[in-house]
Image: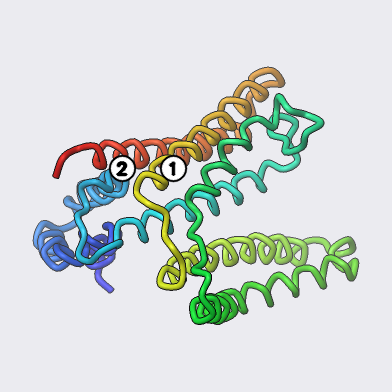
């Protein structure tokens, strides 16, 4: 696959389907100097879903639902990287440091596709879920078997690095397959409306912004560390992605067509 084709594939599906060939052709003709602008254009369009247009009914909602859960998956991985954390808790015993979780969960609930309560749809949903999650479930099973066996407590050196790598690879694989599942079940579920998606993205972004702020304040009190700053930067970037996309979607909904 050429670099031009790869860059064209980074654009949102509706844009890629209409102009992907033209984008690829222009990038090929312009050469490497056009790569930064092409990448920036893809990022800008992902943040402005009201500019996508639709090639078929419901396409924008389907893509944005997957996008929301991709942000959720990235958030889970980022939070796992800083766990345990005194700044970001998730229990009622520490309400002040757990408040960020409320808008996050509200956003996920609003943006989740709802199953159609029909036997055929539920059967299709089950089949797709099993097929999509079979491989990551097996990978998680292997991970749990290793953990429960106690082997991980006795390995050192390269073997320990391999286990850590397998752990994170498994989490990443599971996250990707969960996002894939969200995209595949669209025909068997009721996708959230544009208004719900906008609210979901804004709420999730608010929760992420709160988490980033809490993490930064806690890090500032104890001394700034590269790992803490990196986690804050990731959370802030994810928050910005969700808020900008949610705001643009809300603006586009209110703009007369």
Direction from residue 32 to residue 65 in the image, left or right: right
**Residue assigned mark 1:** 201
Q: Rate crowding at label 2 as few (under 14), some (14 to 19) or many (20 or more) other CA atoms within 10 Å.
A: many
User: Percent from the top left, x then y, of residue 235?
Assistant: 53, 38
Q: Residue at x 77, y 62 (%)?
A: 160
Q: Residue furthest front?
A: 118
Q: Please identify the quadrant where the N terminus is shown.
A: bottom left
Residue at the spot of label 2: 249
Residues at marks 2 and 1 touching, judged by CB atoms closer than 8 Å: yes
Q: Position of residue 147 (x, y in %)?
A: 83, 65
Number of numbered callouts drawn: 2
Residue 191 appears at what percent x and percent y?
A: 42, 60
| Residue at left offset 61%, top offset 49% | 76
Image height check: is 138 above or below 221?
below
Residue at point 11%, 64% (across, down): 22
Q: Report x, y in % for residue 187.
A: 40, 72
Up/down of 177 relative to 229, above or below: below
What colour scheme has been applied to the protein in the rendered image?
A: rainbow
């Amino acid at each position: 696959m050429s670099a031009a084709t790869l860059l064209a594939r980074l654009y949102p599906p509706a844009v890629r389907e209409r102009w992907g060939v033209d984008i690829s052709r222009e990038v090929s003709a312009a050469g490497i100097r056009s790569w930064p602008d092409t990448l920036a254009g893809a990022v800008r369009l992902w943040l402005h879903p009201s500019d996508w247009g639709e090639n078929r009914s419901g396409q924008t909602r389907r893509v944005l639902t997957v996008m929301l859960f991709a942000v959720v998956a990235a958030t889970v991985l980022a939070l796992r990287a800083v766990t345990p954390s005194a700044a970001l808790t998730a229990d009622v015993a520490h309400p002040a440091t757990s408040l960020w979780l409320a808008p996050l969960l509200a956003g996920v609930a609003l943006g989740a596709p709802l199953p159609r309560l029909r036997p055929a749809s539920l059967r299709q949903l089950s089949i797709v879920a099993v097929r999509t999650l079979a491989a990551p479930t097996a990978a998680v099973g292997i991970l749990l078997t290793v953990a429960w066996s106690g082997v991980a407590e006795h390995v050192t050196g390269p073997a320990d690095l391999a286990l850590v790598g397998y752990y994170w690879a498994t989490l990443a694989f599971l996250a990707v397959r969960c996002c894939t599942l969200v995209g595949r079940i669209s025909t068997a579920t009721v996708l959230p409306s544009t208004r719900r998606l906008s609210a979901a993205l804004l709420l999730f972004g608010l929760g992420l912004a709160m988490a980033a702020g809490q993490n930064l304040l806690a890090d500032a009190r104890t001394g700034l560390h590269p790992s803490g700053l990196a986690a804050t930067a990731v959370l802030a970037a994810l928050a910005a992605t969700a808020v900008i996309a949610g705001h643009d979607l809300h603006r586009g909904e209110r703009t007369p067509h």
